[in-house]
Image: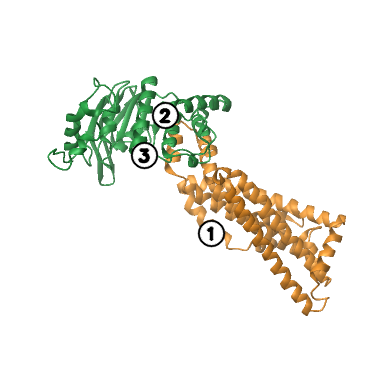
Amino acid sequence: MELTFSEVTKSFGHLNVIDHFNTTIKTGEIVALLGPSGCGKSTLLHMLAGLQTPSTGTLTAGGKRIEKPSPRRTLVFQEHALYPWLTLAGNVALALEFQNTPKQTAFAEAQKWLAKVELSGFEHYYPHQVSGGMRQRCALARAFIARPEVLLLDEPFGALDALTRMTLQSVLKDLIEEERPTVVLVTHDVDEALYLADRVLVFSNRPATVLREIELGHMPKTHDLSAFADIRRDVLNKLGIDTDTTQAHAEDTGEAV
Amino acid sequence: MSNSQAMGVATKRAYVVAIAVILFFWQVAAWFLPDFLMPDVHTAVLRLWEELNSAEFYEGLGNSMTRLGAGYGAALFFGILLGLVGGTINVVRSPLKAAIIILQSIPSIAWVPLFLILMGFGNLPIIVVVAIGAFFPTALSVMNATESVEKVHISAARVMGASKAQMLKRVYFPAVTPELITGAQLAFGNAWRALISAEMIVGFSAGLGKSLAYSGEIADMTGVMTNILVIAILAAVIDQVILERIKHRLLRYQYL
């Protein structure tokens, strides 16, 4: 499903968060919106989800104006979005139950999707009984079970430790390759953007302006990001981070290898 | 699991100690006062045993429980409904909350004369007074809980395509359940007090309150203390056994 932003502006009172933003995201494309926290990239994502409306300008999905949320464009939140009163299976099944799928079918399907994110055996656990990484696996299963055409991810692994994050990025990558939704990923993790995305938009601080647009479509997808070393250094510089290799920041480029 | 069981044992021990202390003070009073003013604990317990074998007692108990069930049930239903409406619709919230705060400061028993004349001598005025006592804490707790439902839980349901009815049933209702139960326990206390006092005043057909008032009128102090004993035991059983059990069942996920 093709997504477009045309002349999108969003302000909260006097605070101008997004100023005349334009871009088109092609069907099946994986785009990462990368930038410092609070730069307005989450607002862009929430507008795509239909949870927020632009102050001026229009957003479209599949040629139609986005006015309200739709299960065809689902959103994965950073954390705490699972319902504490439902088991993991209950949480995943709920996405189908909201589409009026009978309970039994929904739970059978939920079981399948929990297996895909390697949570078999944890169906009857409640969210507070499992780790943060497992909760986000469950959140991914809940997003994918409804077969969305557009998958929106709002810093989905932002609250996880580095190793868990990398495992989950692989899980997500496999699911995306299998289901082929159009993906918009908001992140402040440069490596996550480089690993998952076909195209990265690097944002400045408020109002969010694109500092750089990087096409990565042809690059191989692996956690060994050494092929991206130059791009990575450039992106970090654009974000105002010192990458002078003669200084103490040398390990900054080395850690991904 | 073992943690909550351990807590249960500690709570039980505390109750045993509390009951022993209360009965001790009663007995001390009975030693110092003549029998016709303050009966011994065991005299009252013997009377209670007699009562438990009389049909009259069960008639009163049945009447009181019916009134409680009707009034408390209605209060829970409307309290939850209005609490959810008030919590989700911004225009309604502040005026409704203000109205509740004003009205709940009126002791529910103060409504008795009005409803007695309005509805006539019978069960209905008692039921309404019980409902008024229980309605406010229920509505307030549900409204406050509804306001503070996590935004992300609402957003997540919206992106999953939940309808308004599904949102209410599957997100708001379970989210407010913990506060609702606390409110419902508070509401039970109010309902119970309203029931007994209304029955004492109205005195319509048999009931726990009427039985207590009658014992007082004929200066049967053993009867008075027995009735108080019954009222205390019933309240404790309903609150600490029945409501607590329902709470543990509904909030099972929190106790795992």
Residue A103 percent across, percent down from the top left:
57, 28
Q: Is residue A144 above or below residue A51?
A: above
Density class for disc 1 (Cα within 10 Å; few <14, some 14-19, many ≥20) is some
Asked whether the beta carbons under mark 2 and mark 1 sit within 8 Å of each other, the answer is no
* Chain appearing in orange on the rendered image: B
- The quarter holding residue A155 reads top left
Is B198 on the left or on the right of A97, as rendered?
right
User: The C terminus of chain A appears in which quarter of the rendering?
Assistant: top left
Q: Is residue A243 above or below residue B242?
A: above
- Disc on the earlier residue, 3 or 2: 2
* Amino acid under disc 2: Ser
User: The N terminus of chain A appears in which quarter of the rendering?
Assistant: top left
Q: Tag 1, which secondary structure?
A: helix
* Amino acid under disc 3: Leu
Q: Residue at 37% of width from left, 38% of height from top?
A: A78
Q: Which residue is mark 1?
A: B101
Residue B204 percent across, percent down from the top left:
79, 59
* Chain appearing in green on the rendered image: A
- The quarter holding residue A210 reads top left
Q: Nearer the viewer, residue B194 or B238?
A: B238
Residues under labels 2 and 1: Cα distance? 40 Å
**Which disc number belongs to residue A70?**
2
In this orientation, does residue B132 appear? Answer: no
Q: Residue at 74% of width from left, 72% of height from top?
A: B26
Q: Nearer the viewer, residue B84 or B145?
A: B145
Q: Tag 3, which secondary structure?
A: loop
Q: Which residue is mark 3?
A: A160
Which-is-in-front pick, marks 3 and 1? 3
* Amino acid under disc 1: Ile
- The quarter holding residue A37 reads top left
Q: Is residue B199 above or below residue B245?
A: below
Is A180 on the left or on the right of B207, as rendered?
left
